[in-house]
Image (cartoon, rainbow, N blue to C red):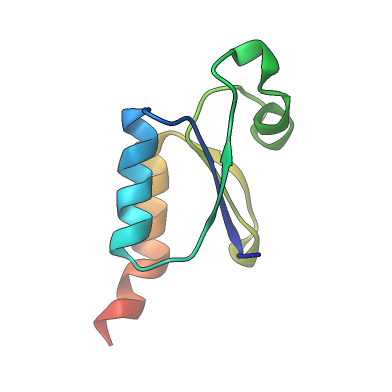
Amino acid sequence: MTDITLYDLPGCPFCLKVKRTLDDLDLEYDVVEVPRSHAQRTEVESVSGQTGVPVIVDEAHGVEGMAESDDIVAYLEETYGSRNER
């Protein structure tokens, strides 16, 4: 199990944006696929308080349920981007 978990909906362009950033930064992460129906997205709702995706959890840095793809990408680049520039 990794420290980063991505709540994802296959085909979601916002989720894909986050996945590309995770891959570009060479980060390991777990994926939890959420159901298409917002009413059935109880797991992601319990983590983030909402049913939209993408959402990430980063246990190593105390991030519990960060939403919004632009915010997630900025966080990942700020937190992990410099580690590959050594």
The picture places residue 51, in percent across and down from the top left corner, at 60, 22
Which residue is rendered at x = 28% and y = 62% of the image? Answer: 24
Name which quarter of the figure residue 82 lies in.
Answer: bottom left
Q: Report the side of 17 relative to 31 (left or right).
A: left
In terms of depth relative to the viewer, which is nearer, 26 or 68? Answer: 26
Task: Please tell me in which quadrant of the rendered image residue 66 appears.
Answer: top right
Q: Nearer the viewer, residue 11 or 50?
A: 11
Picture coordinates of residue 18 (x, y %)? 37, 45
- Left or right: 4, with 27 as reference point: right
**Total tally of numbered discs in the picture:** 0
In the image, residue 73 sits, relative to residue 37, either above or below, namely below
Tell me which residue sits at (31%, 41%) in the image: 17
Identify which residue, 77 or 42, lies in the foreground. Answer: 42
Q: Does 49 sit above or below residue 61?
A: above
In which image quadrant can residue 1 be found? bottom right
Name the residue: 40% across, 68% down. Answer: 80
Q: In the image, is residue 54 above or below residue 41?
A: below
- Residue 75 in percent (x, y) is at 41, 54
In the foreground, 42 or 79: 42
Query: What is the quadrant of the C terminus in the image?
Result: bottom left
